[in-house]
Amino acid sequence: MKSAKLKIKSGKLKFHPYILPFAFCLALAQPALALKITAPAEGAKLTSGKTVTARVDLGKDSGIVKVRYYWYGEQDETLVGQEDATATGSIIAPVALVGLADQDPPFGGKLLVSKDGIGFMRLLAVAEISRGRLGTRSIFDEILVNVEPAASLAIIDFETDKPLHLGRAGQSSAFGHVDSLGKVFELPVVGEFTDGVTRRISTLGSGTSYQSSNQKIIKVLANGLLQIVGNGKATITVSNRGKQATLDVAVDVNEEPNEPPVADAGPNQSIKAGTKVKLSGLKSRDAEGEALYYSWSQVRGSKIALLDVNNADASFLAPVVSEKRTYRFKLRVTDKKGADSVPAFVDVVIEP
C-alpha cells in the first residue's frame, strides 16, 4: 500500500485523498483521555426497571479501585453517595451498581435502570482511584438518557391537601415559606402505573403539562412551575399520557403587591483544577428592592463540598480531573415576603 503524501503546489497545501479518511480513522481509534461511560450511550432510550449493561473506558486514568453508578433525575440535586446499595433517605443516593476490576465487563456489569425513573435521567459514574498512603481521589463521567416505563399510566394524583389552600391570610406555609403574591412553586404530582410503581411526574421532562382555569389566580410558567398572582379560586389540570387530574386551589394571601425576585447565578465559568471557585448570585434582584435569601445546590457532577450555600456567594475547591468535566449549580432566591424566583443555573467546567 502506498503511503499517503502531502503535496505542495503553487505555494498551496494539497492533501492526498487518502489522508483525511486515514486521519479520521486514527481519531476514532484514539482511546478516551479519561473515564468515560460507553454504555449505555448518551441519549439512549431505556426502560425503567429493566437491566442494561454498563461499560466504561478508563482512558489514561490508572489505579482505579471501583466505579459506583448512581441514577438522578435531570434536575435532581446531587446527593451524598454511599456504598450500601440498599441505602435510602433524603441525604444519600443509593448506589445502583458497584463495578470492580474482575467483573465482566471490568468496572461495569448489569445495571438496573431506576424502577421509578421517568423522563430525562442522569447516570453518574464515580471512580475511586487509589493514591497509596495519600488515600483516594474520585473522578466521574455523566450522561443523560431518556427513561420510559413499559407500563401504562393509570392514575394521576397530587401529594398535597385536596383542595389545596395557599396562604390563609399569611398564617400558614404549604411550600416552605409563608405564601404570598408572586410565590413560585412546583406542584408535587405523582403517577400510579399499571406495574404498581408510583413515579414522580411533576416535571415537563416526564411528559406532564399544566393548565390553570384562572391565570389571574394561579399562573402556569413556561417551565411547569406555578405562581400565585392573585386571591380567589382556580383549578389546576394536569395531563400526562392521555390521563388527566384536577386540583382545586384556594388562594388567600396578603394582597400587598409583590413581584417575585429574579435569580442570577452568574456567567458560566472555566476553571483549572485546584482553584477556588466562587459562584456569585449578587446580580439577583427584587423589583421592590427587598433583601433576598439565597439557596444554592448542585445538580450535575459528582458531589463536591459547596460552602456558604445560603449566601449570595457560594464557593468550592475545584477537584482534580483528568479531562474537562462540567459541574452545574442551581440558585433560587426568596424575598422577605416569601416570593420565590424561578431557578437559575450556572455551569462550571473544570479543566486538568
Image (spheres, helix red, strand yellow):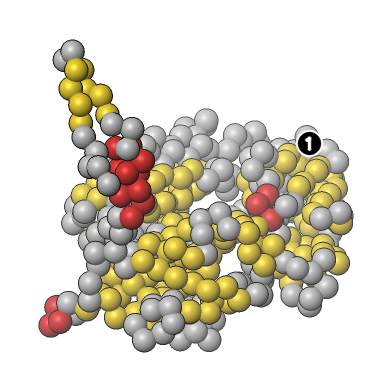
Q: Secondary structure at mark 1?
A: loop
**Type of the residue with mark 1:** Gln
Q: Nearer the viewer, residue 279 or 218?
A: 279
For the C terminus, the image quarter is bottom left
Q: Residue at x 37, y 83 (%)?
A: 100
**Looking at the image, which residue sits at the far top?**
10
Residue linked to disc 1:
215
Q: Is residue 138 left or right of residue 135?
A: right
Place of residue 161 in the rendered image (x, y in percent of width and height, measured from the top left): 78, 64
Q: Residue at x 39, y 35 (%)?
A: 283
* Quadrant hosting residue 44: bottom right
Place of residue 10 in the rendered image (x, y in percent of width and height, measured from the top left): 18, 13
* Quadrant hosting residue 130: bottom left
Q: Is residue 67 left or right of residue 42?
A: left
> Is residue 55 depicted above or below 214 in this figure?
below
**Looking at the image, which residue sits at the far left?**
133
Place of residue 343 in the rendered image (x, y in percent of width and height, measured from the top left): 52, 46
Disc 1 crowd rating (10 Å Cα; few below 14, some 14-19, many 20+) is some
> Is residue 197 depicted above or below 329 in this figure?
below
Q: Report if residue 50 is visible in the image.
A: yes
Q: Residue at x 63, y 59 (%)?
A: 45
Q: Report if residue 279 is visible in the image.
A: no
> Is residue 284 depicted above or below 311 in this figure?
above
Q: Is residue 11 left or right of residue 119?
A: left
**Looking at the image, which residue sits at the far front?**
1
Q: Is residue 350 left or right of residue 183?
A: left
Q: Nearer the viewer, residue 230 or 121?
A: 121
Q: Residue at x 29, y 64 (%)?
A: 59
> Is residue 6 depicted above or below 83 in this figure?
above
Count of labels in the image:
1
